[in-house]
Amino acid sequence: MCKKSNLGVLGAAGGIGSALSLLLKLQPHLVSEIRMQDIDKSMLGIAMDLSHINTPVTVQGYTGGTQLKDALKGADVVVITGGISKVPVMTRENLLAPNAIIMRDLAIACSELCPNAIIDIVTNPVNSCLPIFCETMGRLGTLNPTKVIGVTTLDVTRIQTFIANMKGLDPRQVTCPVIGGHSLVTMIPLLSQCKPHINFSENETEALFNKIRTAGDEVMKAKRGNGTAQLSMAYSAAYFIFEQLKAMTGKPDVVQCGYSMNNIHKTEYFSSKLLLGKDGIIKDLGLGKLSNFEKEKLNEAIPLILKDVETGRKFLKER
């Protein structure tokens, strides 16, 4: 029988966190307990509501910072979804000030309460939030970079859907890695590595790049400013976590794209194909062969990722 995992979901009262928790509740073969935590007072009611769903996954709710330790202690995986969400007039850079404080404080808490847990960061801006989290743990001597991952699966979910829609395919049968970072210009779908192999025209390539890079803003616009992409983000995070949990139970050859700290790429932090295992990242699988167009986009993205990483470091230096 495969070992099941205890998961802490932080920011679980929000649109992403609550939807993600619902999806986790439906996977009793992988999940034994979900510990939902949020500063929002509705958290206990949301957890109670979820607990009434008839699967054997246990659900506990914790509210306020004082109960954070109960949500974290003994967790196998911690998923961070909390923080301020982007609104139409806000850039990802504007998000950093409030969310950086959350990242720092949660890194301190995880260092104390669950230093061996795998940490999945959903909170934006991921390009800066993950460096803040990693380097806070580094200061405390608890960092294992193979166990801290920025969840960028939404980019993969979207590009596979957009490719399928363009070419009349079943999106479940399309795979396409997305590398770089998790922001407007830093995400780079590797259309040349798409499976099944597809020849895209220059116009189709440009259209797909533009569509994936504006998808988040288009959702906010369609929602008239009332929230970000929550359902697709929750689904994508859940998909990543399920694959991660399978790897933790010993399933071989689990590969997912994710943003992580590494020494392979020029930026120190980079999203690429990761081989996952029982204790997190086994290996960064690199970039593979890129088209000239993808190389051009990568060269454009690298200085922007470096800037995002440095912005996160600057926050830590000032505090």
Image: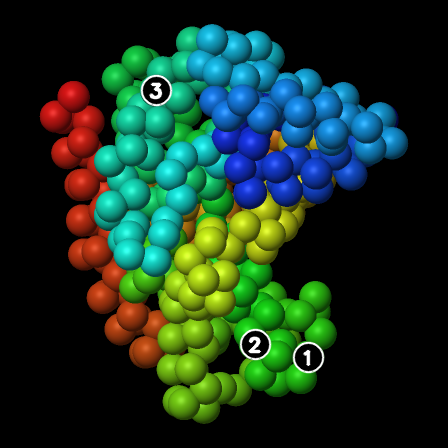
**Circle 1 residues within 10 Å: few <14, some 14–19, many ≥20:** some
Q: Residue at x 47, y 52 (%)?
A: 227
First along the sequence among labels 1 and 2: 2
Please name the residue that numbered disc 1 is placed on. 169
Say the numbered circle drawn on residue 163. Answer: 2
Please name the residue that numbered disc 3 is placed on. 105
First along the sequence among labels 2 and 3: 3
Q: Residue at x 57, y 61 (%)?
A: 157
First along the sequence among labels 3 and 1: 3
Q: Nearer the viewer, mark 2 or mark 3?
A: 3
Q: Is residue 62 above or below residue 55?
A: above
Q: Helix or strand or loop: what does disc 2 sit on?
A: helix
Residue 9: which quarter of the image? top right
Residue at mark 2 to residue at mark 3: CA–CA distance? 39 Å
Q: Position of residue 244 (x, y in %)?
A: 62, 39
Q: Quadrant of the C terminus?
A: top left
Identify which amino acid the numbered label 3 is placed on. Answer: Asp
Residue at mark 1 to residue at mark 2: CA–CA distance? 8 Å
Q: Is the Cβ of the residue at disc 1 closer than 8 Å to that at disc 2?
A: yes
Q: Quadrant of the N terminus?
A: top right
Q: Position of residue 105 (x, y in %)?
A: 34, 20
Identify which amino acid the numbered label 2 is placed on. Answer: Ile
Along the horizontal axis of the image, is 225 left or right of 254?
Answer: left
Q: Residue at x 45, y 14 (%)?
A: 65
Q: Helix or strand or loop: what does disc 3 sit on?
A: helix
Q: Is the Cβ of the residue at disc 2 closer than 8 Å to that at disc 3?
A: no
